[in-house]
Amino acid sequence: MWKYAILSVFICGYYVICVSSEDGKPKNPLTQVCLGCICEAISGCNTTRKCVGNICGPFSITWGYWADGNKPTIAQKSVDDPDAYASCANDPYCAASAVQQYMYKFYQDCNGDGKVDCDDFAAIHKLGGYGCQGPLPDFYVQRYRQCMLHVG
């Protein structure tokens, strides 16, 4: 339980939920709790995890995901720096920024319940912006739901 609380403070210290943009979507659509539970579901929110194959960091981000998330960088790195993707994806704050922007881009009701919420964002994160209506792996759903139950 303390892990969830620390993660919420950790991510909350970095993000402020912004008002809606011109298209009516929130600029940062995920709450801190939602970000934390997606992180928990995908990797156990292992902030020391580095790249394994083409998947990097606590949010398990690929280069394509990072690119769709507007290629945020850390330490004033250029997006053209060969290390820009990995250094961002391995940094929890930068990776969370990529996740926010990815969700903004692919903002949609994946489960057909008439609203866009964290359940939809969890599906988008795991299955991608074009496949979020598909079935989610049981282990991912269980970790996500357990986290939401404890901190959501």
Image (cartoon, grey):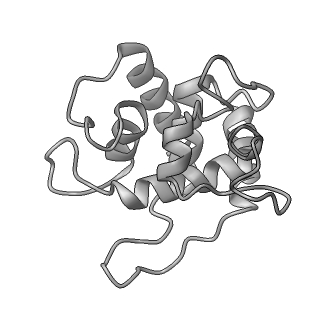
Q: How far across and down, in percent of the image, does residue 58 sit?
A: 67, 32
Q: How many marks?
A: 0
In the picture, measured across the screen, residue 136 lies left or right of residue 101, that is left
- Farthest bottom residue? 22
- Relative to 93, say whether 142 is above or below: above
User: Which residue is painted at 66% across and 64% down in the image?
Assistant: 15
Observer-nearest residue: 129 or 84? 84
Q: Residue at 47% x, 38% y: name it.
A: 148
Residue 21 lies in quadrant: bottom left
Residue 16, horizontal then vertical, whole percent: 63, 71
Quarter holding residue 53:
top right
Say which of 86 and 123 sits in front: 86
User: Eyeballing the image, is 147 above or below 107?
Assistant: above
> Percent from the top left, x then y, of residue 96?
62, 50
**Residue at image point 65% right, 57% down:** 72
**The N terminus appears in which quarter of the rendering?**
top right
Q: Is residue 110 left or right of residue 75?
A: left
Question: In the rendered view, would you say 35 is above or below 26?
Answer: above
Q: Name the residue: 46% across, 53% down.
A: 102
| Residue furthest to the right | 75
Percent across and percent down for residue 112 are: 13, 46
Location of residue 104 with respect to 61 vertically, above or below: below
